[in-house]
Image (cartoon, rainbow, N blue to C red):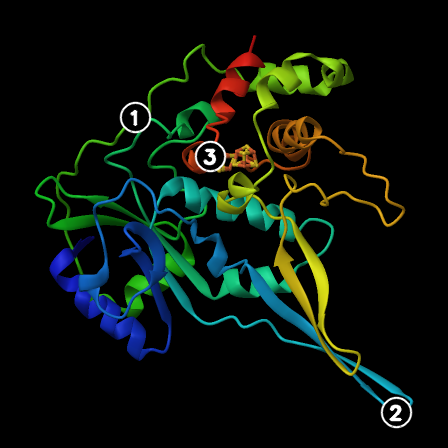
Amino acid sequence: MILSKEKLGALVEQVKISGALFAAPAVDGGQVVMKSVNVADEISFDYVITANSAKEYLFPQTETIAVVEIEKNKVKLSAVEPDAPETVLFGVRPCDAAAFASLRSVFTWDFIDESYTKREDKSIVLSVACTKGDEGCFCTSVGLKPDTTDGSDLQLKETTDGGSFVVEALTDKGKEFVKKFSDVFDDGSADTKAIFTPDEIPGGVDIEKIKERLADPAHYADPVWPELARKCFGCGACTFSCPTCHCFDITDEGDVFSTERKKNWDACQIDNFTLHASGHNPRDTQTKRWRNRFMCKFHIYPKKFTTKGCVGCGRCVRVCPVRLDITEVMAEFSK
Ligand code: SF4
Ligand code: SF4
């Protein structure tokens, strides 16, 4: 099937009329971000990857999960249903779509997190395969591809003339979407632009070797950790921008009579992330915190799940103010 860019306007309009939210890459504050758009003219096609990942549509930065009200001799705790609007996520890069599969693994593992699953069930992911990239991209080093289909309901590939997309429906949800908005999709096929291939990581990466080295507890004392991670100052930008990072905390905000219980993104790079009430902090140095982040992606996560702990989007490399490059650590641990 073909979706011409000219018909995107009709698609956005029809989706909006149906009551759903339409999020797509669009310029905001001088960068291309995933944001809610009202008309197709707002959509940007000139981007490698959006500055934020699309995860915030399924796992928002903050949400109220319960309210507590205290009256005389009575405490009332009421759950708050997650706000889960029908959502179309257009223009998601395949690495970010694959990250949804990763988030689902976590949020349906030992407990079904309905805040996530309800939003995911109401969302449809239209990924666009990459025809360009930058030096931060490394999906191929973690076993994915710039046209990976994991986590996508529909995948779009830009045609050689740049005026349309060839569309492949990958899931039942994707097929339903095409049926529902059938007048904007045309039968047919066309030649598509060449898919971008990221450069190999200098020094080479061997994911199995990384896993093997991290499985040996001797690595905890490896002097390579302080050497590699000493410049990290714990800002948390890498974790907040990461499409697969999923940690959150729960806080009560309000006063003694009325409180909202909130679920907020948290970041393992922040010093109080593992601070115990006793004052003890098992990860009391930035090196330990950074080592944990790397272990989470390449040892702890792969032991539990078949999806990816890191999808190679490169955001953590691009946003790090001290340029702590995860690929350099991957190359070091591939030796
Ligand atoms: S973005 Fe860089 S400095 Fe900030 S926590 Fe991550 S690695 Fe450390
Ligand atoms: S660890 Fe870095 S490269 Fe990997 S998915 Fe997270 S932000 Fe992207």
Residue 15 pos. (x, y %): 30, 71
The answer to which of marks 2 and 3 sits earlier in the sequence is 2
Asked if ligand 1 lies within 8 A of label 3, the reply is: yes
Name the one closer to the observer, 309 or 257: 257
**Is residue 196 something one can see in this rendering?**
yes
The answer to which of marks 1 and 3 sits earlier in the sequence is 1
Question: What SS does tag 1 mark?
Answer: loop
Residue plotted at (46% across, 72% down): 85
Q: Image height check: is 318 above or below 175? A: above
Residue 219 pos. (x, y %): 72, 15
Report the side of 260 relative to 2 (left or right): right
Question: What SS does tag 3 mark?
Answer: loop
Residue plotted at (64% across, 52% down): 107
Q: Image height check: is 308 above or below 31? A: above
How far is the residue under mark 1 from the one under mark 3? Answer: 26 Å
Badge 3 crowding class, 10 Å Cα cut-off, few under 14, some 14 to 19, many 20 or more, is some
Report the side of 231 relative to 316 (left or right): right
Q: Which mark is residue 187?
A: none
The C terminus lies in which quarter of the figure? top right
Question: What SS does tag 2 mark?
Answer: loop
The answer to which of marks 2 and 1 sits earlier in the sequence is 2
Query: Which residue is tagged 3?
Result: 321
In the image, what residue type sits under mark 1?
A: Thr
Q: Which mark is residue 197?
A: 1
Residue plotted at (61% across, 46% down): 105
Query: Which residue is tagged 2?
Result: 72
Count the marks. 3
